[in-house]
Image (spheres, rainbow, N blue to C red):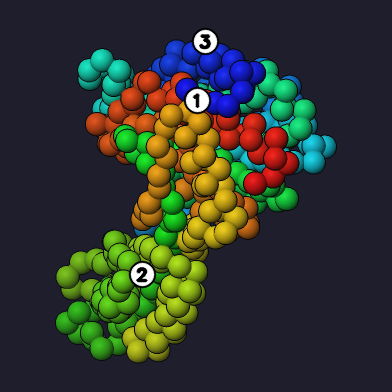
Amino acid sequence: MKADSSSVKAILEKANDLPLLPRTLEWAKVNSGTTNLDGLATVAAVLADAFSVLPGETSLVDPDMVEAVRADGSVDHVRRGQHLVTSVRPEAPVRILLTGHMDTVFAADHPFQQIVELESGVLNGPGLADMKGGLSVMLGALQLLEQSEYASRIGYDVMINSDEEVGSGSSAALIKRLAKDKTAALTYEPALPDGTLAGERGGSGNFSVIFTGKSAHAGRNPDEGRNALVAAADMAVGLKALHREGLSVNPAKIDGGGPNNSVPDHAILRVNFRPKTLEDQSLAQSALDQMVTDIAKLHDLGVHCHGSFGRPPKPIDPQAAKLFGLVKQCGAELGLDISWRGTGGVCDGNNIAACGIPVVDTMGVRGGAIHSADEFLITESLVERTQLSALTIMRIAEKGGL
């Protein structure tokens, strides 16, 4: 460690005394897949108790309602878990936002539930890296901050949502509200095994296109029917033709169809867009809107599009570059070589950046193979990344900004 003052160094050394690994293991042992509302409630209560050590107000916030298009075309409301919010020194002149998520991609009945040691210092388990370990790092960094001389100079909001793994639909408005007027944001997705951070990110949009045709007998009067399945397939081919550098288009599934002797009157096309830039996103939206109109006219049936670009692209603008530079500088003080590169993945960092707030969104542990049964956590990174976050926050407080 090369932190440049004895007082800061002494504070950072205290990371070794925090229960970073034990609480990570405790939290990861509770299944908190996005759809496991009981598991999420258990983890939310445990997290609320853990974060209550901070000198602020911690509460659980009810989720917004989320709409989902069912296979029959009906639009239903989906329940999500509560979100945790902790607010400390809301009156401070400099305030930052720290975010994470308590949900994982592993449902309550998923076979991946156990934590095992792969080798010394490497653990395999659900949510260890993504992101129970990151939550422990976040709390640890704030615990160190609160023991420092810089604590009084900076305030912060913590937001830990329950639905990040499915797009943060029930927490998007909460993220936007908490991001308002913040100097910067840190999000605790895992870094790569070598510590590399995610830089710019593309965006993501998910859509369900509902086709309502007209049934008819396939032998007696087929021309009186309006084939929804064919219209959906036609649109899938047309959407795939939009795929190019800067815009990935993935028609993923068609629900619908029926018996061979009937013209199908119902179908739903599910499609995902991955635009690299906001311009790519705008062009994709315009093309999708135009295709809805054209397909409806060509096939003489109803076409309704449901969905949105829930994760806008996240470029590295000048303010974000300053924040990345600060993290790199803090890493150097700790003897870490911090670098970053672009990624096609998305997270809540996309939503924060869309609010005009600079964000580094991979401040969590080093690990890998996330979203699979091979997910792993490099345990030494718990202390390392806690110190990196704590020092970054203290530097923002010391400078009064970026």
Q: Amino acid at mark 1?
A: Lys
- SS class of the residue under badge 3? helix
Categorize mark 2 by other alpha carbons within 10 Å: few (<14), some (14-19), many (20+).
some
Mark 3 surroundings: few (<14), some (14-19) or many (≥20) residues within 10 A: few
Decide if residue 284 is on the left or right side of residue 244: right
The spot of residue 74 in percent (x, y) is 46, 60
Amino acid marked by disc 2: Gly
Q: Position of residue 321 (x, y in %)?
A: 53, 53
- Residue 268: assigned label: none
| Residue lying at 31% horizontally and 71% vertically, measured from the top left | 245
Q: Which of the marked residues, 2 or 3, is nearer the chain's N terminus? A: 3
Point out residue 211 in the picture as x, y percentages from the top left corner. 38, 73
Q: Which mark is residue 17?
A: 3
Label 1: few (<14), some or many (≥20) within 10 Å? few
Pick the front one: 382 or 312: 382
What is the spatial separation of the Cα atoms under label 2 and label 1, in whole angstroms?
Answer: 41 Å
Q: Quadrant of residue 5?
A: top right
For residue 2, the mark is: 1
Is residue 250 visible in the rendered structure shown here? yes
Answer with the quarter of the image where residue 193 lies: top left
Q: Is residue 160 visible?
A: no
- Mark linked to residue 246: 2
Position of residue 305 relative to residue 109, above or below, is below
Where residue 300 appears, as percent x and y from the top left, is 38, 87
Q: What residue is shown at x 38% (from left), y 21% (from top)?
A: 380
* Disc 2 from disc 3: Cα separation: 46 Å
Task: Please state if 353 lies on the left or on the right of 397 as rendered.
Answer: left
Q: Nearer the viewer, residue 136 or 328?
A: 328
Q: Nearer the viewer, mark 2 or mark 3?
A: 3
